Structure formats: structure tokens, C-alpha cells
Image (cartoon, helix red, strand yellow):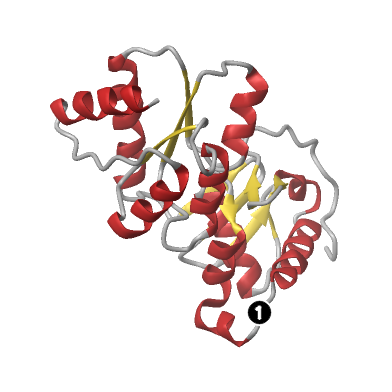
Amino acid sequence: MQSLADALRVFLQREGFQVVLAYDGVEGLRLVTEEKPDLVILDIVLPGEDGLEVCRRIRQEPETARLPILILSGKGEEMDKVVGLEVGADDYLAKPFGDRELVVRVRALLRRSLAPTQSRVLRVGGIEVDSERYTVSVGGRPVALTPRELELLRALLEAKGRALGRGYLLETLWGRDRKVGIESRTLDVHVRSLRNKLGREGQRILTVRKVGYRVDTSLAVPEQGPLPGA
């Protein structure tokens, strides 16, 4: 494993990237916190803590929750890929892979994460959030949300299917107020209320075990009748 990591470091440095290397999950988490990298490449099989657990923990911390993550694995089965993406990875590359393919994936993730947001209108399925006007609609019909429900929905849509950790969502919704005892259970209450207000589109908000929540951007939701309270 060290030989692969060393080889990738040399190759990526030749491509112009600055690389900080860790050989185990615990050290990797420490370096992510201290170095604040633009992107994280994780092998699933790591000493100490495996790559999936490291990915979960990165997503749970507000300071690192939005870092792009690329997972490398010798397991090419579809279920392994699904699990990797569900715990918060942005992309998944099965071994063996070519050096050029790795660079293409890395540059694509960096472009997506560093590019400025062009539109403040977020759309997934029938859900539309106008961040400037603070309005939400489902299937063209307005939906009344509380300010925190709107912020929760906006954060999930901006993640574009990536899982967001509970710590990050609590910090996003309550900020400094979290210090006065806001519990994780309070977040669950807001998610449950949001799902209900979105009607059938609320099915898109998925619980990711040991991580938090994400939005299923590909789910086919049947056209619905009047929304709750409409």
C-alpha cells in the first residue's frame, strides 16, 4: 500500500499538484484538519481506520464537510461503489486504474469544487429553491418553510447528492447557538418536518447511516397532488 501511495505522490507532483501523504487513517484525518487540502484521495483499505470511516468523519466536521473526496479501491463491485458514494465520496475509482484516468478525475473534482456558483436557483426534481428571494416551490407550487428548514434544504441541494454530516448540518443551521445544547435529535425533527412539507419529493432526502443526510438527485418521483397544508 505504501508503494502505491508513494508512486501516486510522485506522479501527482509531476503533474503540478502539491501532495501531503499519510499511510493510515488516523494520520490522514489529522493532516486533513491541519493542512486544509483542496481534495482528499482515500484508499478504502487503511491501517487504523479504513477509508470509509475516514470519509464519514471528514463529512461530519463543519470545517471539512465540503472537501471533494475521491475513493480508491480494489473492490470493483457495484455495491462497494454505492457504499463509498453514500458515505460521502464524490467519486470512486476501482483498481487497477491508469495514471491519466486518476489525473482526469482529480482535475474534474477540483473544477467542480472551486468553480463559482453561477445561479442562486437550485433545482432537483420538482424542488426549486431561490436563495435570493428565500422561496421554495415543488412542482411550481409555493411551499412555506421555516428559515432553518429552508437553510437545511438549500445545504442538501447544494451538495448535489453528496452526504452531509450531522456536525456540518448542525453548524450550518444553528452556528454558535449549537453551543447551548442543540442536540442531534433536533436535526432529525427538522428533517422529518421538511420531508413532510415537500410531499412526495420529500422521499429524496435520505438518511445515511453514521453520517447524516443526502438528497437523491436521480430518484423518479411520481407527480403528486396538493401538498400538505395546501
Q: Is residue 229 visible?
A: yes
Instruction: Classify residue 109 as left or right of residue 177.
Output: left
Snapshot quadrant of residue 7:
top left
Going 81% across and 59% down the picture, which residue do you hit? Answer: 196
Residue sitting nearer the eye, 88 or 74 = 74
Going 52% across and 31% down the picture, which residue do you hit? Answer: 44
Residue sitting nearer the eye, 19 or 4 = 4
Q: Is residue 86 above or below residue 210?
A: above
Disc 1 residue crowd, few under 14, some 14–19, many 20+, Cα 10 Å: some
Placement of the C terminus among the 4 image quadrants: bottom right
Q: Residue 39: give x, y in percent of width and height.
A: 34, 42
Q: Residue 184: give x, y in percent of width and height.
A: 69, 69
Residue sitting nearer the eye, 12 or 214 = 12
Q: Is residue 226 above or below residue 8?
A: below
Q: Among all residues in the image, which is located at the extreme bottom? A: 180
Q: How many marks?
A: 1
Snapshot quadrant of residue 10:
top left
Going by the numbered disc 1, the residue's amino acid type is: Ile
Q: Is residue 195 above or below residue 214?
A: below
Going 64% across and 40% down the picture, which residue do you hit? Answer: 125
Instruction: Classify residue 185 as left or right of residue 76.
Output: right
Q: Is residue 129 visible?
A: no
Going 63% across and 48% down the picture, which residue do you hit? Answer: 214
Placement of the N terminus among the 4 image quadrants: top left
Snapshot quadrant of residue 142:
bottom right
Residue sitting nearer the eye, 42 or 48 = 48
Q: Residue 204: give x, y in percent of width and height.
A: 71, 44
Q: Residue 136: give x, y in percent of width and height.
A: 62, 60
Residue under pointer 1: 182
Label 1 secondary element? loop
Instruction: Classify residue 200 as left or right of residue 39.
Output: right
